[in-house]
Image (spheres, rainbow, N blue to C red):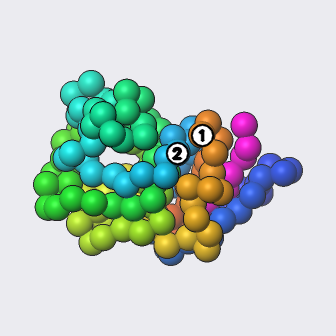
Amino acid sequence: MAEEPAPGARIVRGHVGIGPRVSGEALVAEDHFSARYDLDRIAGVFSRPSHKLHGQSYVGKVLVLIGAKGGVATAWMLRNMAEAGRAPLALLLNTSNPIMAQGAAFADLAFMDRFETDITKAVAMGDRVTVDPAGGIIIIDKR
């Protein structure tokens, strides 16, 4: 049975996703995401200087970004990050690709895409977000 959202919380629907139900702090940017090119997977931070989240830690955060980029290395990289305790808690993308979904599944990360609204505008940096992939919803508690 799903819990009731807190008063004032907003529910946003997306495509039914994969992975566990999780809650955490949102890390948001109007930028794309590649596990291979954007991250320092050892330090747990965004390392590409031109990325809007450059220098910020993604570990244990709900990443909210425009879309996926990159190739097949994403799958094993996300798994490696999860095994090392250096993975995001969840990935929420406006648009994705099969490789990002495969990577999230391989790493057992919560993952959703194709929302009813631009997810990078619906969620603000620091909001508490509950991701319910099986239900196809996220619950946003504004900070």
Question: Dot 1: within a 10 Å radius of its alpha carbon, few (fewer than 14), some, or many (20 or more) residues?
Answer: some
| The quadrant where residue 72 appears | bottom left
Whether the residues at callouts 2 and 1 have beta carbons within 8 Å, the answer is: yes
Looking at the rendering, the stretch of residues picked out in magenta corresponds to: 137-143
Quarter of the image where the N terminus is located: bottom right
| The quadrant where residue 44 appears | top left
State the residue in front, 5 or 36. Answer: 36
Q: Is residue 71 left or right of residue 18?
A: left
Q: Main secondary structure of the magenta part?
A: strand
Q: Where does residue 12 sit, x and y in percent of width and height?
A: 66, 65
Q: Is residue 125 left or right of residue 73?
A: right
**Residue 108, numbered circle:** none
Residue type of the residue flagged with mark 2:
Val
Question: Dot 2: within a 10 Å radius of its alpha carbon, few (fewer than 14), some, or many (20 or more) residues?
Answer: many
Q: Extreme front residue here?
A: 50
In this view, 57 is above or below 61: above
In this view, 115 is above or below 8: below
Q: Where does residue 128 sit, x and y in percent of width and height?
A: 64, 42
Identity of the residue drawn at 17% across and 61% down: 71
Q: Is residue 38 left or right of residue 119?
A: left
Q: How far separated are the C-alphas under marks 2 and 1?
A: 5 Å
Instruction: Tell me the element at label 2.
Output: strand
Identity of the residue drawn at 58% across and 65% down: 118
Residue type of the residue flagged with mark 1:
Met
Identity of the residue drawn at 33% across and 30% down: 45
Identity of the residue drawn at 51% across and 68% down: 134
State the residue in front, 32 or 26. Answer: 32
- Look at the image and tell me whether residue 20 can be seen: no
Q: Is residue 8 left or right of residue 64?
A: right
**Residue 125, numbered circle:** 1
Instruction: Tell me the element at label 1.
Output: loop
Q: Disc 2 marks which residue?
A: 28
